[in-house]
Amino acid sequence: MELQQMRYVVEVAATLSFTRAAERCFVTQSALSHQIAALERELGQRLFTRSSRGVRVTEAGDAFLAPARRALASAQQAVDAVVAEPDHLEGTVRIGLIPTVTAVRVPHLLASFRAAHPAVRVEMEMGNSDDLVAKIRRGDLDVALLGLHPGIEPRGVGYRQIAVDHHVLVLPRGHRLAARTEVSLRELATDTFVDFPAGTSGRAQSDVAFRAAGVDRDVAFEVDTAGVMLDLVAEGLAVALLAPGAVPASATVVSTVKVVDGPRRTEYVAWDLGSPRRVARALLTALDREASV
């Protein structure tokens, strides 16, 4: 059994695609498939099943993944420990973020990090906070930027708070409340909303606020990104509650209004609680500088 075979298995499990896993590992799909097949023969167990519906991890594959991730993390730590130049970093750092991060200018953060550490490859993915935390615990991500309802903290990871913001109401320009300076949730009972999917942490922030206000609302549209929300609002199809930084200053086709009893959100940065890799620690340091600007 080789570490490279473990890497291939972990990537296939993360992407549920032999093609995407091969791309991420910079090998041909045939080479990756051959190595996984060789490992399965050695183990005497199938790690994946493939069908017309896609790739699935088998029970044996699930059992293999956690120790494989630990082995890969330990191998990387061994490499980090013997780097001759303390300030020289190589490898890959993986960052996850929610679509509505406002506490940090992510493009500027990544540009300054790459300028300081040009030999480090940066991989980024978006998702909801719960999924990102789970990926850190599994070892699929090094660092994540999260947004959670106040009082809810990330579990099983290291974390620190970086900001608290109050959502604003986003309206079409011609909406009956667009000229107001502030509104209450009760005034929105008859409006149609667009929000994040039910069950996600992004959605929970608004749901909790409406329950506390004793107001029912109609969420007709569920989408994953703030950009699509703004498009639906601009077309007059719905209203939305978003962190103020998620609404670009150039968005002239929508209006924002303060909500006196609206939802709040705490932004966190999270990382591997056990032993963050050197590249992750360097990214956390860069993030601290960016968040303090």
Image (cartoon, rainbow, N blue to C red):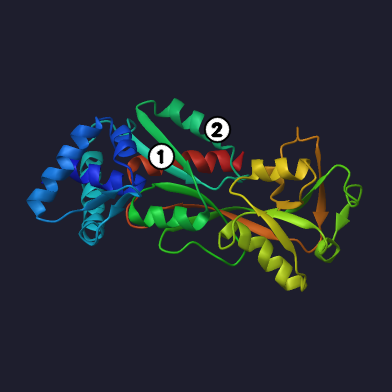
In the displayed structure, would residue 155 be above or below residue 43?
below
- CB atoms of marks 2 and 1 within 8 Å: no
Q: Name the residue under label 1.
A: 282
| Crowd around label 1: few <14 · some 14–19 · many ≥20 (10 Å) | some
Question: Is 168 located above or below residue 293 in the figure?
Answer: below
Task: Please state which amino acid type lies under the numbered disc 1.
Answer: Ala
Amino acid on which the number 2 mark rests in the picture: Pro
Q: Tell me if I can see residue 166 in this picture.
A: no
| Residue located at (30% from left, 44% from top) | 11
Q: Residue 227's x, y, as percent?
A: 65, 40
How far, Cα to Cα, is label 2 from label 1?
16 Å
Nearest the eye: 100 or 120: 100
Q: Which of 269 and 32 lies nearest the eye of the viewer?
A: 32
Mark drawn on residue 53: none
Please name the residue that numbered disc 2 is placed on: 107
- Left or right, residue 26 beside residue 273: left
Q: Position of residue 145 (x, y in %)?
A: 52, 48
Residue displayed at 39% across by 47% down: 141
